[in-house]
Amino acid sequence: MPDNNLRRIAIVGGSRIPFCRSGSLYADQSNLDMLTAAFQGVVDRYNLSGKKLDQVIAGAVTTHSKDWNLAREAVLSTDLSPLTPAVTMQQACGTSLQAALLAGSQIASGEIECALVGGTDTTSDVPIVFKRRFAQRLMKLNKAKTFGQRLKAFKGFSFSELAPQPPRNSEPRTGLSMGQHCERMAQEWNITRKEQDELALESHRKAAEAWDAGFFDDLVRPHNGVIRDNIVRPDSTLEKLASLRPAFDRSGKGSLTAGNSTTLSDGSAAVLLASEDWVREHDLPVLAWLTHSRTAAVDYVDGDEGLLMAPTVAVAEMLQRAGLGLQDFDFYEIHEAFAAQVLCTLKAWESESYCTERLGLDGPLGSIDRSRMNVHGGSVAIGHPFAATGARIVGTLAHVLEKAGSGRGLISICTAGGMGVAAILERDNNGSGGGSGKKTAKKAAGKKSSKKKSAAKATRKKTAQKSETAAGGGESTASGES
């Protein structure tokens, strides 16, 4: 943030539940169930039971009308003080990152001292409604006072009006799905199928290794009998990925498949933010600092820009304001809505014409060290419950920076509607600069012995195998939208 008078925004830490393939292990879970679990994970981890937080901001993309006050209902379902206020918001796949930016601004300005932010989404429990014409008939029927008025409400009725209307995943302005839009991008930027499959394979490999190494132990809270993401496929190969048919363009030109795109997913995530003073007062750790952010949009309707190219703009503008170069980062967390989207983004930053003509820069932003990108797997492998992804990434990157001891990380997330959200997290060379967090760390750890940790790892592997079987999801499972 450019104003030196603003206070620093601490990332205390996050918690999420395992992400699961749609229609599998969370088939009976609602957005409220899952968001509550993510919130409670933060409450338990940082000993916040009974405490009043200044702000809670969270949301979901695919929601029922009954979830109009989702964030507040989730708060009331946790052990937080019922005096904690909450705001429900939505910005497609950028929802929970945007929630962090909004709450962070309030902390920086001194309006609040602490905030819990998050997101949740399920495509296993989607709202299915009647056609608008039939819904209007029902409204007229509800207002009717005489038998004649009731009959009149059904004048011209057709049984086709009873056909259920599930949520649409196409862009209202174009009628094209996100996958179809991304196919156009891949063709424009000459992204090959092999490149996409290689990135997807790498995402699965990194996520599987992270789980086996125990990286996610402090970040993921078991939920509904699940203790590990059931989408990660450690046994995936390039040969298996290459055998899949294109999912969005069957003309012979298509390259996006179920294997190199995110699958429809269920899950939730949350992150605790605070001021430096509040952190010290409550003796909590600071994993990283939220230092810069930017939101941008592209004209994908009339300007013929790629629907998912807005992060290229958001990141470029953010770097200019921060006085940083694209190479000034130790880690990059780029949301993998589709492997092709990530590759298009990287190629755009390397393009002199795109950076000078579209981004208004003097030259290309350049390449990044790919070994520093999504170091513990990305959305293709872990899953993408739309509104939860931002909080997952913030929590993960903060954890990465803590383990590294110091450093700087960049976050880039594309969203529906042609928008992009970007942020920078940093950790000081001399550590977090916050409270010691010793007391809380001991409670969160539960004084586990190394023996118990080994047993937990063995259990995770066993459950993961069961989860994959229960999901019924091989690499041929239809890919989801972002």
Image (tube, rainbow, N blue to C red):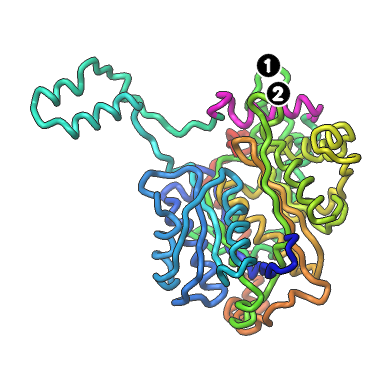
The picture places residue 307, in percent across and down from the top left corner, at 67, 32
Q: Can residue 107 be seen in this view?
A: yes
Amino acid residing under circle 2: Gly
Q: Mark 2 points at which residue?
A: 254
Closer-to-camera residue (295/95): 295
Dots 2, 1 in contact, CB < 8 A: yes
Which residue is painted at 51% across and 65% down in the image?
55
Q: Does the magenta stretch include residue 175?
A: yes
The region drawn magenta spans 172-192
Q: Is residue 34 above or below residue 258?
A: below
Callout 2: 10 Å neighbours few (<14), some, many (20+)?
Answer: some
Q: Distance between the residues labelled 2 and 1?
A: 7 Å
Q: Does the magenta stretch include residue 323?
A: no
Whether residue 73 sits left or right of residue 440 in the image: it is left
Query: Which quarter of the rendered picture does the C terminus lie within?
Result: top right
Closer-to-camera residue (410/384): 410
Which residue is painted at 86% across and 40% down in the image?
361
Q: Can residue 204 be seen in this view?
A: no
Q: Mark 1 points at which residue?
A: 251
Judged from the image, the secondary structure of the residue bearing numbered disc 1 is loop
The picture places residue 377, in percent across and down from the top left corner, at 72, 51
Residue 29, numbered circle: none
Amino acid residing under circle 1: Ser
Q: Is residue 291 above or below residue 83?
A: above
Judged from the image, the secondary structure of the residue bearing numbered disc 2 is loop
Closer-to-camera residue (10/12): 10
